[in-house]
Image (cartoon, rainbow, N blue to C red):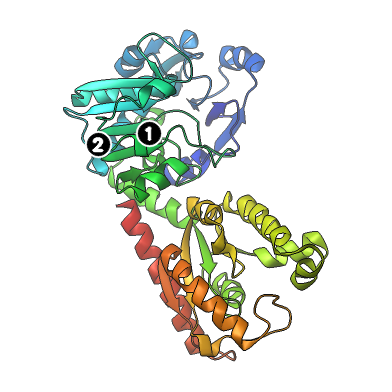
Amino acid sequence: MEYGLIGEKLGHSFSKIIHEKLADYTYELCPLAKDELDAFMTAKQFKAINVTIPYKQDVIPYCDVLDDSAKRIGVVNTIVNRDGKLFGYNTDFAGFLYNLNAHGITLKDKKVMICGSGGTCKTVTAVAEYMGAKEILVVSRSKKENAVTYEECIRHKDVDVVVNASPKGMYPDNGESPLDLSNFPNCKAVVDVIYNPLKTRLLQQAEQLGMKAVNGLEMLVAQAKFAVEHFLSTEIENDKIDQITLELLKQLTNIVLIGMPSSGKTLTGKALCKYIDKTVVDTDAVIVERSGMSIKEMFARHGEAYFRQWEHDVIEEFSKQNGLIIATGGGAIKNEENIQNLKQNGVVMFIDRDLEHLLVTDDRPLSKDTNAVAKLYEERYPLYTKYGDLRVPNNYPMEISQQELDELMNTILEGYHEILCHQWA
């Protein structure tokens, strides 16, 4: 390996994609068990590497030279091999600082609360000190010197900015959150260094409470840019950070389709994957395939609650993935946890078909006649409008023309890209 990333678990990493956009080399992911680290570092069979959890402090003794940031923070995430001499750098500092500045978040004269007391906390603390934070409060799972516990932190109602520097909520444990933000009414901004999922439960709650919510994707791209500059002894314009971050968002963010039965979600999803490089997943079709039963049969044999559990589990599984078009069943919006899961990596499109254009079909247990469809429409429409990031009218005929299909696809894709640009900014 010439260039790459070492860490214990790297299945969630986007670093390969980012580095190969920044530079003309092959970047490898090299997971290492703890008992493999010494042999790897001693052999020095690399030109330059990045280091991630849990080895950012463990690699320091192998470095011959440390830059000022690495010395001050005590954390190394970038190592360059120059003729057998290992130079250690910390580019997370510059990456986190860039992320804050890019989103207009200042820590000057602010009370900053940092969740987690590991290596990332040290970097965030250093940036907070550099920006002139008034007070820095570190929160740890256990009682430690210069830190408070999660039980104790809720007394600090006057916190201005919360930073999650812990892995709480990171893939595959997506549904977790380090704390309840409603305990901090003065908080104006929340930054989560996690980038997988793109929107953790913590950030989702921040948005619901009207706080600025920023994930760690741009920090990841920024620190990679600064690392590549060390790798290749070159300079890269900061505009490249913005460009790659937006490219990644477009590549990673799912398009989620919600709406009434027969509104056209399945057909739209199948058509959409021909216009954008994403894989379509129909949650109802997955349930039928895995259970060996039709939806109608499942309702008849086991009841709606049984089906909804299947639906929840399938949505939970696929919403953790990236680069998908997810067509959901009409009732998926009845469970708010489904929406939280779908929005963690997705933009939700409400495919809105007027009541008079909805079909009555025997294979849909809850919409078997006109009155049943009308009742569902009345019950669910407020939920579709509440959860949809974009409303997409779809009153096109079932035998849709190519021109009409192009119009529908353009409406979805233009809205999707506009939402991503707005969220990223």
The secondary structure type at the circle numbered 2 is loop
User: Which residue appears at 58% of the width and 71% of the height?
Assistant: 269
Q: What residue lies at 30% left-to-right and 49% top-to-bottom?
A: 210
Instruction: Name the mark nearer the viewer: 1 or 2.
Output: 2
Decide if residue 376 is on the left or right side of residue 153: right
Judging depth in this view, the residue of 421 and 48 nearest the camera is 421
Picture disc at residue 398:
none
Residue neighbourhood size for the residue with mark 2, other residues' Cα within 10 Å, grouped as few (<14), some (14–19), many (≥20): some
C-alpha gap between disc 1 and disc 2? 30 Å
Q: From the image, tell me which residue sits under label 2.
A: 186
Compared across the picture, whether 321 is left or right of 239 comes to right
Q: Which residue is mark 1?
A: 223
Of the residues under marks 1 and 2, which one precedes in the sequence? 2
The amino acid on which the numbered mark 1 sits, given as a three-letter code, is Gln
> What type is the residue that disc 2 sits on?
Asn
- Asked where in the image residue 132 lies, by quadrant, the reply is top left
Q: Position of residue 76 (x, y in %)?
A: 42, 19
Percent across and percent down for residue 363 are 73, 79
Q: State whether residue 287 is above or below residue 39.
A: below
Vertical comparison of 14 with 162: above or below? below
